[in-house]
Amino acid sequence: MWKRRNAALNGLEDEIHDHLERETEINIARGMSPEEARRQARLAFGNVSLVQEDARAAWTWVWFEQMRQDLRFGARILTTSPGLSFTAAVLIALVIGINTTIFSMVNGLVTRPAPGVEAKGLVRIALADRPGAGFFSYPDYQDYAAQTTTLQSLTAFTNRRMTVASDRGSYAFNATAVDTNYFETVGMRVIKGRTFTVGEQSGDSSGLVAIISERAWQRHFDNADDIIGRAIAVNGQPATIVGVAPRDFRGTMLMEQSDVWLPLVAFWRLIAPQEMQRWLTDRAVQPVDLIGRLAPGKSVSEAQADFTTMQARLELSHPVERRSPVSVVRYSATAGGVIPAGAPAFMAIFSIVTLLTVLIVSANVANLMLGRAAARQRETAVRQSLGASRTRIIRLLFAEGLSISLVAWLAACVLTVWAARTIPRLMPESPLGNDPGLDFSPDWRVVGYAMLLAGIGTVAFTLAPAIRVWRQDPLSWLKAGEHSVAQGRSRLSNSLVILQLAFSVVLLTSAGLASRSASMMMVDLGFDPRNLLLMNVRTASSATSREASITLTDRLLERLRSLPHVRMASYLRNPPRREAVNTFGGRDFATVHIVDADYLEVLGLSPITGRLLTAEDRARSNAVAVINQNLADTLWPAQTAVGQRLSLGRDRQTVEVVGVVANAYVSGFNPERTEVRPQYIFVTEQPMFAGWARGDPIGPGEIFFQVRHEAGKFDAVAAAIGPALREVDSSVPIVFVRTMSAQLEGMTLTARMIARLLTIFSLVSLLIAAIGQYAVVAFSMRRRVREFGVRIALGASARQILAAVLREGFALTTVGLVAGLLLSLGVATAARGVLFGVTPTDPRTYGGVFMVLAVVALVACCLPARAATRVDPVQALRQE
């Protein structure tokens, strides 16, 4: 069709020429001269150009032709005004890029599945009123699976760290216990072997079986071909490997880094046989998480109605103290958790901020376009005088804006891809080394979001020039000289630059306060973390009783103390426990640390009063403890704590205080759970703990060793630890070995990540503000060419012109800084609760921000100001 239309249009001129030639020959035959015959033929035919246009209008789509012409003309701005186009495209690309980067990261957290999971049709069963705590009782799960009419499969799982031993050594693995239909439900297929069968669920008669990850296969089993059927031990229980999971599959939820999967009931039998029956039958106990796959043709809303009905039936048939309403949500790696629960509020705020930033940057670009339109008003007037309508001229302006936005959109997409890969590398590394495996790269949602922002920007920054053209009187500009320009100042432009500067102050001060707060989080811990190695091991597979656990720990400790370059060593048994502390005068809470007698000495803590713990304290019939000064001041203000007695926990075990040490953050400082006055109790493995109602904390579990070594010998000591521990017991796996400093830095990881992200985005905002201020000052200079010419003609020097321009630029800067200061104080005051060691009015932060913005403003104003001093007064006065 297009070829026939183009061929007809191209042949039209030949047809007209042939027609005129025939008419001319006829007129000559009638006796006319050749010149007169040709003239009469043309008169009879009419306006050739009009006939061609009428034919074109009849044979083509006029609106399409005009649109194509407008777009072709609009694209010329990229070559005819490269400076303006580049500046405008950079501004728009920056604001679109930074917003799409944030959107891409949120999109990756909220909507992306975990690697290796077939997400289509998968749903997460969560608790509607408790995001992040989506756990259910096993009997409820069985009823859901039996009664559901909307899911083709429903499966349960739970997580825990386990010890896996083979002939090559022992390793601490993150384990996931799953129902037998788990892998089928999540869409994962093993690369070797098979998945679990129904008969292997309990693990009693058929024996314990396991599936391991490809990473564990390669790293700990040397990629052995005979891995299927290989015998291992899980927490000391014999097991057989029956399958290998794909490389990218590490579990279904965020931060799940599983290396071994076990049948669910067999897993419970292994870790807590005395509790297994209660977990299997008690509906008040909620140990499992649920994921399901929709049946063909069923929707999430139908599944939600189905579970609501089943929940109501369970409330009637099996009432419990609290059964939360069920929420069925589309699956992602964070579905049902805190992140997606807070996503709507975050996205609402983010959308408002995004729209504001797009509009502000669009206003800055509009200033550039207004400056160009001011220089082209006579050209526009000539176009109108030649018959161009206002609508056609406005379409040309939108075509120019669309060309710039298209370039900016392409650049923003590239910037987003680069930022999504680069920003994670700029973040502080976690000492835990956990990689969630989420993909933050842009998908079609992000590309569409960037296109939407580009469209909004196109309309926003072409609106002001379009309004100017619509209101323009062509007659006055046709009478004006060739170089006429708009005169005066633009209050709108000035207001927009002030607003942009104010927002930059808010972002920069927020980033500054966050960075200062993060640096202040590196508090004085009260002990020296340098030359201190931290190691975590599991003894669950090697010790089966309290006595065996103590004996094994002592042997491991002695071996560590014998290593070269080791000065001292001690340990903390299992994570510290927060317990109620009762005295004759009142009740409080403290954190109980069960430690070796040398623990406080290894950390470098000396007694203020009394003494430290000794090895003999372990066998005392009357329990003794050392407390820190905070607890002593709380329980016995203005008294001597040594010799006093207190009781711990629900058992009210009596403990005598034998010493008080200085306050120290022995477990590190965690800004997310700040203890302004940490209260600690240090005890040894005394018999009093064996009968605790909450379970004996000295049983087999995890041990945290602290090794004080010679300066600069960490690598040597760390390399020697593994072989040394295997000499004592090859079945004891090492969970991690790291410096104490790295461990402590991990506790401030979130705060430092937020501070660094704010810094990155605030620097982009600063760049946008600088370009915006330059644009408005340059536009003002273009409007005031005649004014400068008159001043120079009347004797004003270049220095006076420069000073006048700089005064105006700095006036805008001052107003913007003051407005930003007021906004920043309000934002910082509202965020006072998340700041640590920094006030909302921190003078160092505000002084640094104001200095940076003042320098940026000076550079942004100087360039157009220098151009103003070079105005030729003769050319400027000729505009009149």
Image (tube, helix red, strand yellow):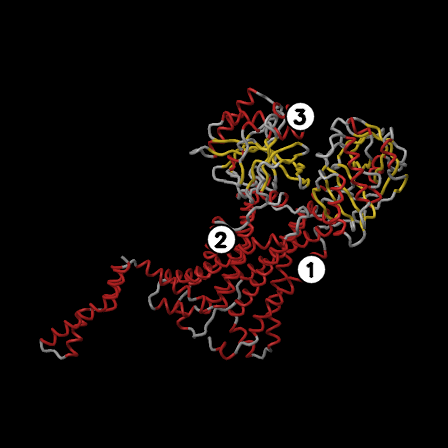
- The answer to whether residue 279 is left or right of residue 681 is left
Cα separation, mark 2 vs mark 1, equals 33 Å
Q: Nearer the viewer, mark 3 or mark 2?
A: 3
Marks 2 and 1, the one that precedes in the sequence: 2
In contact (CB < 8 Å): disc 2 and disc 1: no
Label 1 neighbourhood size at 10 Å, few (<14), some (14-19), many (20+)?
A: some
Residue 401: horizontal and vertical position, in percent?
45, 60
* Amino acid type indicated by mark 2: Ala
| Vertical placement of residue 579 versus 57, above or below | above
For residue 188, side relative to residue 685 (left or right): left
Q: Foreground: 197 or 341?
A: 197
Q: Is residue 458 above or below residue 553?
A: below
Residue behind mark 3: 275
Q: CA distance from mark 3 to mark 2?
A: 54 Å
Find residue 450 and name its label.
2
Query: Which corner quadrant of the image does residue 850 belong to?
Result: bottom right
Q: Amino acid at mark 3?
A: Glu
> Callout 2: 10 Å neighbours few (<14), some, many (20+)?
many
Tag nearer the camera, 2 or 1: 2
Residue with the mark numbered 1: 848
The secondary structure type at the circle numbered 3 is helix
